[in-house]
Amino acid sequence: FWSFPYIGLSDKGVPQFAIIDQTPGTKTRVESGTLLDYMVYSGVKDPVFSGGLSTNFRYQQFTLSATFNFQLGHHKRLNPFMRSQATSGGIGQLRIPDPEKNASTELNKRWRQPGDEKYTNIPGLLSASAYTETLTPWWNGEPYAFAENIWEMYNYSDIRVVSGNYLKLQSLNLRYVFSDQVCKRLNVSSLYVSLSGTNLFTWSAKELRGQDPTSQSGSSSKINVAVPATYTISVNVAF
């Protein structure tokens, strides 16, 4: 898949892109070529390698077993920073969530004042008028339009692409089998207890910030939060 080449924020906290905004404040009017001429290759979304690994260790009356899953060789887009929300006119606009809605913690690192563009890639919260102006870029209405607006380009830029490689500890089980002597004293033929867990941990790109890389596939644009781990204690008795 392909992405818009992000080159940083302007001194107003607005995303800029190579060729289209190569020099801050100067618009490079590109009137020929195809869209891919102004994008960069970001890799593949489907993993090149995928598989699993099962292990089993035994020591005296303890048995420890684990199952791992992994995928390698692909990339994913982060969840959209500016989501499309329908307006009263039925036209989707990319906008920051309303105050009563949840927002990404990425906003804590957003651009706040001139000079911040040297330290962050998270756009600023613009005034209503400044934001409205970004919705009508200079190429609006032209046959060579790059995107609806710069926020769509930011969502589909290379700065929002991360490695999709991961190693997941899918399950872990620890079992203790009581000896025949103990079973005989308790008048049972066998007895064991076990502690197991699933969805325990995923090693993946730190940029995902807890999102589960296994939850995005195909053309989906969303990555869900990690599935909570579950734990089970079992006691098995046979008479």
Image (cartoon, rainbow, N blue to C red):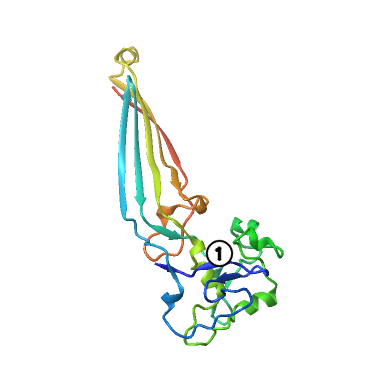
The residue nearer to you, when weighing 185 against 120, is: 120
Q: Is residue 124 left or right of residue 219?
A: right
Q: Position of residue 217 (x, y in %)?
A: 38, 60
Q: Is residue 42 left or right of residue 236?
A: right
| Residue shown at 48% from the left, 70% from the top | 4
State which quarter of the image contains the N terminus. Answer: bottom left
Displayed quadrant of residue 201: top left
The residue nearer to you, when weighing 197 against 58, is: 58
- What residue occupies the far bottom of the structure in this picture? 142
The residue nearer to you, when weighing 178 against 219, is: 219
Q: Position of residue 154 (x, y in %)?
A: 54, 68
Mark 1: few/some/many CA within 10 Å (<14, 14-19, 20+): many
Q: Position of residue 194 (x, y in %)?
A: 38, 29
Q: Is residue 76 above or below residue 94?
A: above
**Total labels drawn:** 1
State which quarter of the image contains the C terminus. Answer: top left
Residue 1 appears in the figure: yes
Displayed quadrant of residue 220: bottom left
The residue nearer to you, when weighing 54 against 77, is: 77
| Residue shown at 71% from the left, 65% from the top | 114
Q: Amino acid at mark 1?
A: Phe
In this figure, which residue is indicated by the disc labeled 1?
81
| Residue shown at 35% from the left, 47% from the top | 70
| Residue shown at 54% from the left, 80% from the top | 91
Q: Is residue 109 above or below residue 203?
A: below
Q: Is residue 64 left or right of residue 122?
A: left
Q: Is residue 118 left or right of residue 169?
A: right
Residue 79 appears in the figure: no
